[in-house]
Amino acid sequence: MMVAAGLFVSAAAARFARAQDGEPDLTLHGGVPPDRGGGPAVAPPAAIVAARPEAATAAEVPWGFYRDRQGRMMQVSFGGTGIWLSDGATNIMPVAPHRGENLSAEQIAENNAVVHRAWKLHYDHCRHSLANAFYQGWDLHPGQLPTRYAAVFTFFLEGLDAASERLKNFVEKAAQATLVGDVFDDAATGQGLLNYFLRAINCGAITEKEATKRTSITLEELRAGSFVKILKNRQG
């Protein structure tokens, strides 16, 4: 059904701005983030789609497997269509159960524990989504905004040094390979690294000035958003 949906959208992509699949809303803009090191490996969409969960018992299936598999199906089906997809919301609210001015110490402690637990859950959900290339999400309560910002900013800032070095080396080596007549055929990885910076800028984690300083890419090249165009610019 997902594949059929992907073919349908491909045939009429200009008419679509968003796709929805109920709750959780697994409508994400595809693209697995580049390996930033220090975290678990993220399998590509096709690998999870091809997995056979029916062969495992319920106890052996990792948390979120079926939900992630549904999301990967949508990545494979809608990939290349230009459709932006958004992950679903965390429905556990960071709301204190006890209200009023004259609360006991036990009630205050319980309020703190409930809110902190909800924040931790939401933060983990956001980080899980980002690690699986869900770059958009939505929230149900203003109290979830602090953990949304914390998760998104931390995700990009943790890998910033490694991504900066990789993209800088990628551009330099690609230009050198072109100059000596070698074949440089890994432009997709370069584009993935460039997308990492574009998304970090879009969410406010870094500025354009920081990105250009770290990667040696010009502001014009950064705003063009195309690794292939960067290579052509360096060839000239």
Image (cartoon, grey):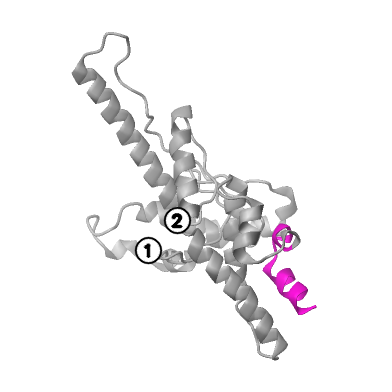
Q: Mark 2 belongs to which amino acid? A: Glu
Which quarter of the figure has residue 235?
bottom right
Residue at 37% across, 33% down: 92
Give the spatial CA distance, label 1 vs label 2: 9 Å
Stretch of the chain drawn in magenta: 221-236
Left or right position of 203 against 113: right
Are the residues at dot 1 and dot 2 in contact (C-beta closer than 8 Å)? yes
Q: Is residue 235 magenta?
A: yes
Magenta span: chief secondary structure: helix
Which quarter of the figure has residue 214?
bottom right
Whether residue 125 is visible: yes
Q: Which percent across, then down, holds residue 34?
A: 51, 65
Q: Which percent across, then down, holds residue 107?
A: 23, 18
Left or right position of 100 against 24: left
Residue at 80% across, 78% down: 236
Instruction: Examine the rendered structure and indicate whether residue 229 appears above or below residue 88.
Output: below
Left or right position of 219 against 89: right
Q: Which percent across, then down, holds residue 189?
A: 57, 71
Q: Which mark is residue 158?
A: 2
Mark 1 Cα-neighbour bin, 10 Å: few <14, some 14–19, many ≥20: few
